[in-house]
Image: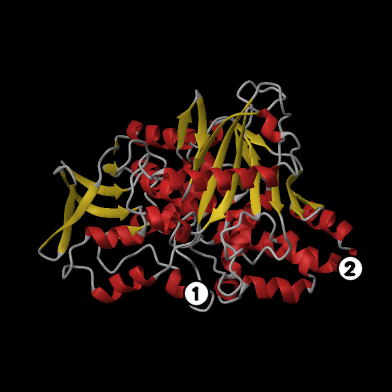
Amino acid sequence: MKYDIIIIGGGLGGLVCGCILSRAGKRLLVLEKGKHTGGCIQSYRRGGMEFDTGFHYVGGLEEGQLLRRVFDYLELMKLPWKRMDEVVDRVMIGKRTFALAQGYDRFAQMLADEFPAKRDALYQYADLLKRTEEMQLNALNPHSSDMDFHTWMLETNAYRYLQEKFDDSLLVDVLSGASLKMELRKDTLPLFTFAHGYCGYVGSSWRIAGSGSLIAEALAEQIRSQGGEVICNAEVDELLEKEGQLTGVRCKDGRIYEGIQFICATHPAEMCRMLKQGGLLKNVYRHRICRQENTNGMFTVSLCLKPHALPYANWNYYVYRHPDIWTYPSDGEIDRVLVASHVPDDGGEYVRQIDLLAPMDWSLCRPWIFTQVGKRGPEYEAMKLRMADACMTLAESCIPGLRRAVVQCYTSTPLTYRDYVHTPDGSAYGMRKDFNSPFGGMLPVRTPIPDLFLTGQSLMVHGVQGVTMTALFTCAEIIGRDWIWKQVIQK
């Protein structure tokens, strides 16, 4: 059988593309190298509990928001979503705590109460975030364009914008406080990436009663119900070429699948690896991909708690040991942590699972990069114990008595993400973006090879909303922007 489209990678981007294109009547195959679909939104089970890898909460599911429209189309709003409290994030810097609210006006108002001299600037900033979300919504409208605003955001340094806008280092820290959704870099981070990472969450923030795997499972089931195929444990080793065009893929176990068009929903460097040297892919493009740096990874502590020990918090804590949160410690110190609770399975008042997340640079993993899961040695395990202890120490500043409530603790590093989720360098947010070369790091969904497309977090924007939006652009190149606008966005 020859497929209309073969999608390499069963993460969120590949599954969204598969669901949309199969609905459009395409004969479609999704190949996932891992045991499960989902990529960074998949979950794992330990001690009878299910833990998320990279999914903890999501923005943009209020009626009318972009992600809500797409999730309505994909029938994902049937999942058990739970809206978070009005104050969705509490940012602790040193001994002070600040509230970040849902709703653009409420977000600005609550911060203006803390920083009255910056009231006008805060409302202007909230308008910028709102306009950013509107730009996302209209990006696929064939009759609308806001390229000047889009280009300005790409070419503007996020840190410099905030410093000039507010001239208050503490307020800049607070506005950046929910920043573990991205990698903060003073010298390079574009305002485009920064604002896109925040705008959906300020509009509305949600958790799911369950795990991110519910999303992946629902999308895979839809693809199958529409005649498509989803195959796991199918690692693509090579994109096959014949007479100047792509003809199929070969898996590592020897299986060959023929196709007409192809979507690589993995890291772009993986696409380069699958294409033979001297073939269809020119070296200049290959070198461009290989030169791109990846963002940092995450250290994760997944905690199982005693029953009825701690009340459920329908919000997040972002805890920072020091101010100037745009500067990371050079010695690998844990100086910040995200504290996120799981929605109780029984719908009750007490939390049974809490995740702690802290940035972790790939350099800290280098001594073990050639090791395998479960065979990294005692020094690696000792490092994880030290880091987990540091994360819990920070977390106890907002949840006193947390340690006493813990019955089991599971940890993961960027090495874990590399080996299970297959992200190069265990990167949490894909390829690094740089305002100094905005279009150098923003890859188009079209590649130089006809009928080969890209999707995923490394192209434009990361996160659930960013990956979903990028998938829409990928599908638009195949079935047309008008189709996506009318069937997915307007519908």
Q: Quadrant of residue 339?
A: top right
Label 2 secondary element = helix
Q: CA distance from mark 2 to mark 1?
A: 33 Å
Q: Position of residue 232 (x, y in %)?
A: 29, 37
Q: Position of residue 81 (x, y in %)?
A: 61, 34
Which of the labelled discs sits on residue 438, or is there none? 1
Q: For the residue marked with disc 2, what is the amino acid?
A: Ala
Specify whether 459 is left or right of 35: right
- Which residue occupies the extreme bottom position in the image? 436
Specify whether 269 is left or right of 435: left
Residue pictured at 71% horizontal, 22% vertical: 308
Residue pictured at 72% horizontal, 28% vertical: 310
The residue nearer to you, when weighing 467 against 170, is: 170
Q: Is residue 475 above or below residue 127?
A: above
The answer to whether residue 33 shows anywhere in this view is yes
* Quadrant of the image containing the N terminus: top left
Q: For the residue marked with disc 1, what is the amino acid?
A: Pro
Q: Which residue is mark 2?
A: 117
Specify whether 338 is left or right of 322: left
